[in-house]
Amino acid sequence: MNLPKIAISIGDLNGIGIEIVLKSHSEISHICKPIYCINKNMLLQASKLLNIEIPENFELFETKGEFDIKAGTVSKKSGKYSYNSFMDAIKLASKKEVDAICTLPINKESWNKADIRYKGHTEVLRDYFGKHAIMMLGCEKMFVALFTEHIPLKKVSKKIETEDLTKFLVDFYKNVKGDNIAVLGLNPHAGDNGVLGDEEVEIFKAIKKANKYFDKNIFKGPLVPDIAFSPMSRKNFKYFVAMYHDQGLAPLKALYFDESINVSLNLPIIRTSVDHGTAFNIAYKNEKINTQSYINAVKEAINLSKR
């Protein structure tokens, strides 16, 4: 049986990504053929620091570059290397040399030090493909899509506009095909009919237009944000659209932190990722680390590649 090929972007080598990869290889190599975007010298250095042997069937794509790994450190060189690893994975997928990519965590400050103008993976993907990538995070029990992402909270309300949100909802449905999708309001009590804000008027119009586009009652809301993720609500909905980053991710991570993954939708390639950071505080200390998010991300990349 031909296993799907998954390019693994190695993330920031000063963090826990490489340890997760080495410890998980045996398990994921039974379900796919991972190709790790890291060169042999950097891999040997990390392996020695971790005191973990490199598996025999550990296939590499030799991402260029070399530097001294400094555990738990924000670094221009580690930022640049993590970016190059990601770009190599993207190119492999674009050329159909792999079926999907899975990314380990980068450090945004390290990217900034390396003069990389992007704030994260999703922004790179948008620019590279000229498509509006949708950031969705979650697990089998619950997924949250973010209408706005890494922007200051004070700018969110200005971004909530009917046409843009309608397009977002339409693209989101085309990717997930979920027939019951919750759309959150922005304000407390979903605005209380304008008493606490009028952004919900724009959200309601977008919901109405998106449902009309599909001639189906797919999108429900705007839901009152403080009860949107209650147990009863989660019985009714698997997919949620949040208006801003923490509105969606705070409840998701409180409920499913160790299981959640990140999926980039609306792109010509498949990309999944872990839903956690570089954990500099425990990097290279051989402490117990949870690999479930990474394993789930690889599994979802495989599932999406078969569609």
Image (cartoon, rainbow, N blue to C red):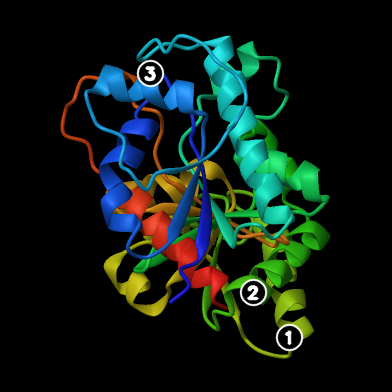
Q: Nearer the viewer, mark 2 or mark 3?
A: 3
Disc 3: which residue:
45
Looking at the figure, which quarter contains the N terminus? bottom left
Name the foreground residue: 200 vs 269.
269
Seen at 46% across and 68% down, the residue is 3
Residue 173 has which mark? 2
Disc 1 marks a residue whose amino acid type is Phe
* Number of dots carrying numbers: 3
Residue 264 vertical position relative to residue 234 in the rendered view, above or below: above
Q: CA distance from mark 2 to mark 3?
A: 44 Å
Seen at 64% across and 71% down, the residue is 175
- The image quadrant that residue 207 belongs to is bottom right
Seen at 30% across and 41% down, the residue is 55
Which element type, helix, strand or loop, lies under badge 3?
helix
Disc 1: which residue:
214
Q: Earlier in the sequence, mark 2 or mark 3?
A: 3
Disc 3 marks a residue whose amino acid type is Gln
Residue 247 lies, in percent from the top left, at 48, 47
Q: Earlier in the sequence, mark 3 or mark 1?
A: 3
The answer to whether any part of residue 133 appears in the image is no
Q: Is residue 70 left or right of residue 35?
A: left
Looking at the figure, which quarter contains the C terminus? bottom right
Q: Is residue 292 left or right of residue 286?
A: right
Name the foreground residue: 253 vs 193.
253
